[in-house]
């Protein structure tokens, strides 16, 4: 029974990365990365520029060999069973490579010639999937960046992959382009396709992905569902109070605030008001109790702002402030 359950779980894993390391000369670029990508999920790979994201992706698709570790796609070893593994993968590393003086359709025809069994019917299908019917016969040099990104995705979908790898897909896009691409990626996942999305943009990963691996200095420091990771952080509460001295005494005396960071923003006082903002991390259940205690102590409450934790909060906590967009 236990073995059957394990096989069932394994069948849901499209990409399995175990103990992946990469050393160039004496420098250890990738420190031992392990994660799985499940069928039909959007998996985020989050880290600052230079953290090792693109190096990892190049290993995932067999462009460079790891020093140690293994990569399996749909059960096939990427290096020992290269062709079998990569038949299930579509990928855009950095920017899609396109012929600007050909039309979108002609570009797809060129790439289709390199794939066995991919003909006009499949080209029609991917054009419809990416929603480019109206412009597919225009030259690529007339396309916006967002349209080029879609054509690149159409190219990556030609072989009907189980896994689509996108490296920084929103780079250079304007806000509208980012929104459209996000919605498009979500629709792709609803068809059962697994997506591996690399990004240094915290907000994009939080809005788009089901699960995320956070990478810092070539090492994955946490993997999990986005909501569950965010929930690890306590709520940040901003109290706007007067007098702030009395409020600080009440908050500092609370066992809920013990050991938590607390800061005072006195910019309101500089503007001629006696109020100040006190910022503290607290569990949700402490907020009504402390509100009552502050009022009983004669503190005037001008405002209470509850700031929901974000992936950025978690990243900064885990990496001790490593720079990220």
Image (tube, rainbow, N blue to C red):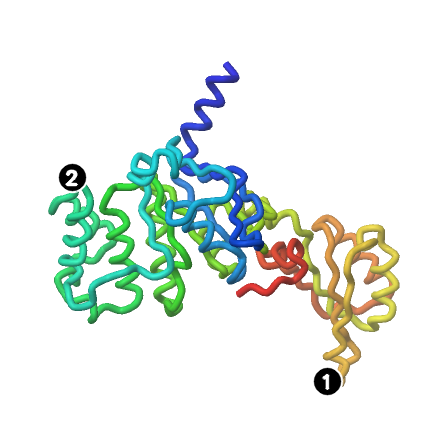
Task: Please state the horizontal and vertical placement of residue 79, each as a whole percent of the image.
Answer: 39, 38
**Tag 1 and tag 2, C-beta contact below 8 Å:** no
On screen, residue 124 versus residue 234, left or right, reads left
Q: Classify 10 Å Cα crowding around label 1: few (below 14), some (14-19), many (20 and above).
A: few
SS state under label 1: loop
* Residue underneath mark 2: 117
Q: Nearer the viewer, residue 316 or 89?
A: 89
Looking at this view, name the residue that lies furthest to the top.
1
- Residue 228 location (% of width, % of height): 58, 44
Measuring 50% from the left and 44% from the top, which residue is drawn there?
A: 67
Residue nearer the viewer, 4 or 300: 4
Left or right placement of residue 217 versus residue 79 in this view: right
Q: Residue at x 44, y 38 (%)?
A: 71
Q: Find numbered disc 2 in the image and state the secondary structure of the residue it sits on.
A: loop
Residue beneath disc 1? 271
| Residue 145 relative to residue 256: left or right | left
């Amino acid at each position: 029974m236990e073995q059957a359950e394990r096989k069932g779980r394994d069948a849901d894993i499209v990409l399995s990365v175990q103990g992946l390391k990469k050393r160039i000369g004496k420098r250890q670029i990738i420190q031992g990365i392990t994660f799985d990508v499940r069928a039909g999920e959007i998996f985020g790979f989050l880290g600052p520029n230079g953290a090792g994201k693109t190096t990892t992706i190049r290993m995932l698709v067999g462009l460079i060999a790891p020093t140690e570790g293994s990569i399996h796609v749909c059960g096939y070893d990427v290096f020992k069973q290269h062709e079998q593994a990569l038949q299930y993968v579509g990928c855009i590393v950095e920017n899609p490579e396109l012929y600007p003086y050909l039309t979108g359709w002609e570009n797809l025809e060129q790439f289709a010639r390199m794939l066995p069994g991919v003909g006009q019917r499949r080209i029609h299908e991917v054009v419809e999937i990416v929603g480019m019917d109206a412009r597919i016969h225009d030259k690529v040099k007339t396309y916006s960046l967002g349209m080029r990104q879609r054509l690149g995705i159409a190219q990556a979908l030609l072989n009907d992959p189980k896994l689509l790898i996108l490296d920084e897909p929103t780079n250079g896009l304007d806000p509208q382009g980012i929104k459209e691409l996000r919605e498009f990626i979500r629709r792709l996942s609803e068809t059962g396709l697994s997506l591996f999305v690399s990004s240094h943009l915290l907000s994009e990963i939080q809005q788009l992905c089901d699960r995320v691996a956070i990478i810092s200095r070539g090492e994955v420091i946490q993997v999990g569902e986005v909501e569950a990771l965010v929930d690890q952080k306590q709520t940040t509460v901003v109290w706007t109070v007067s007098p702030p001295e009395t409020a600080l005494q009440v908050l500092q005396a609370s066992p809920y605030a013990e050991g938590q960071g607390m800061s005072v923003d006195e910019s309101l006082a500089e503007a001629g008001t006696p109020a100040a903002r006190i910022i503290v991390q607290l569990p949700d259940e402490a907020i009504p109790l402390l509100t009552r205690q502050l009022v009983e102590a004669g503190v005037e409450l001008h405002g209470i702002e509850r700031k929901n934790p974000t992936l950025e909060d978690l990243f900064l906590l885990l990496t001790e402030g490593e720079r990220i967009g």
